Amino acid sequence: MPLALIATPAPPPVPEQPDGAAAVLRAALRRGPLARTAISRETGLSPAAVSRHAAELLALGLVYEPRDPPSAPRPGRPRIPLDIDTAHHLAAGVHIAIPQLTFSLTDLRGRVVAQEQAPRRLTPAAVLQDIAAKLPGFLHRHAGGRSVLGLGVVTGGWVDPESGILVENSALGWRDVPLRQALRSATRLPIHVDSHARALAQAELLFGAGRDGDLVHLFVGNVVDAAITAGGTLLRGRRNGAGGIAHLPVPGSSTPCPCGGTGCLQATVSDRAVLEHAVAGGIVPRPELRLLLDTAVQGDERALDLCRTRLRLIAPAVALLLDMISPDVLVLTEAVTLYLPELLSVLHEEVAARTRQPVAQLVRAGSFGPDALAVAAGAPVLAAVHRDPMSLRTARSA
């Protein structure tokens, strides 16, 4: 069966607040399978409006009607529930990191269907050429005839999703890279560009810990940045620059930063910085994060101490974000707590010493485990679909 692609050169504008169809879709996402009467109560829409929007979503293949097993008949009209249809559509994505590119396909519930990694070349032009060259084969191998609703292009640092430009990623050494424009001629898919912190915040709101609350997402890798949501809406700031915390000062740190200062958060706690310490201390022979984490998992005390130190150095930034934003939840996506979840208590203890917030209740690890980068890659596409599902009808008729 041929792969179905939606021939739209750029993603349509996405409304900040969901309309009726989006409210029905979101209710099915949260609690499906869910009867139309329950959706009406949850959304405040009239039964007639729910039925109308359900018919639209059914026609688009975004929801389906799971049939209950046979049971004793009940009076009145049968209650056929709605649930998210994961059989027809996928979101494609690519995450650009220092060591590699991650290609992914995710379904409408944010579950990773397939992912592949490829080495990252140095220059933006070479990387974008690789994405354009490798994407068709990846989709052909894994999409299985399902339609691909869009391509997410995600990386760290300051990204402007409106213009599709990577404004700055200091870890990559890239500035003002026109991601969307460069890939537009290589794919017929709508291209959604964003930072991985914001992409994962959107994924947490849809599928994870956020669920439309006030959420802070903190990403700590080779890039350190944050995303802030209020009432389910991302805080973007001027030119979508909100969340830039790479240069927050870390008390006691004298690590030099490329900005010319010392003790900046990213320079102090990034994967690169931790691996430099690990190699210099003879803990691992090569600067490979997975090698360091495997050594720590095996119980090497020096590796464990280095991991604990990283979490203690992250703690002041976490406490600051908790006090400034007072979110319902702060989600940390970071490798140590992914592979050694028991060390999250080290972060809790250090943060609790700096704030009166109920840290153990508020601070948790990311919801997507080892698939975090794959989920991040597709999340901008999925967020657009769940906020404005009727845009698919427009795209199909374009």
Image (spheres, rainbow, N blue to C red):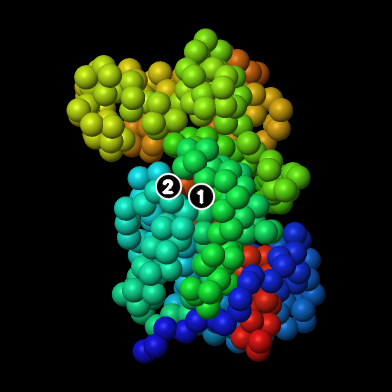
User: Residue at coordinates 49% horizontally, 26% vertically from top-left?
Assistant: 267
Name of the residue lying farthest toward the top: 252
Q: Position of residue 174 (x, y in %)?
A: 52, 45
The answer to which quarter of the image holds residue 113 is bottom left
Q: Position of residue 346 (x, y in %)?
A: 43, 21
Q: Residues within 10 Å of mark 2 (few under 14, many from 20)?
A: many
Q: Is residue 288 above or below residue 146?
A: above
Which quadrant of the rendered structure holds the N terminus? Answer: bottom left
Mark 1–mark 2 Cα distance, whole angstroms, equals 6 Å
Residue 279 seen in this snapshot: yes
- For label 2, the SS is loop
Residue under circle 1? 155
Q: Position of residue 165 (x, y in %)?
A: 61, 55
Q: Residues within 10 Å of mark 1 (few under 14, many from 20)?
A: many
Q: Position of residue 141 (x, y in %)?
A: 31, 75
Mark 1 and mark 2 lie on one chain; the one further toward the N terminus is: 2
Do the residues bearing badges 1 and 2 touch, measured as CB atoms within 8 Å? yes
Q: What amino acid type should be assigned to the residue bearing mark 2?
A: Ala
Q: Is residue 86 above or below residue 321?
A: below
- For label 1, the SS is strand
The answer to which quarter of the image holds residue 343 is top left
Q: Nearer the viewer, residue 86 or 397?
A: 397
User: Residue at coordinates 48% horizontally, 38% vertically from top-left?
Assistant: 171
Q: Which mark is on residue 97?
A: 2
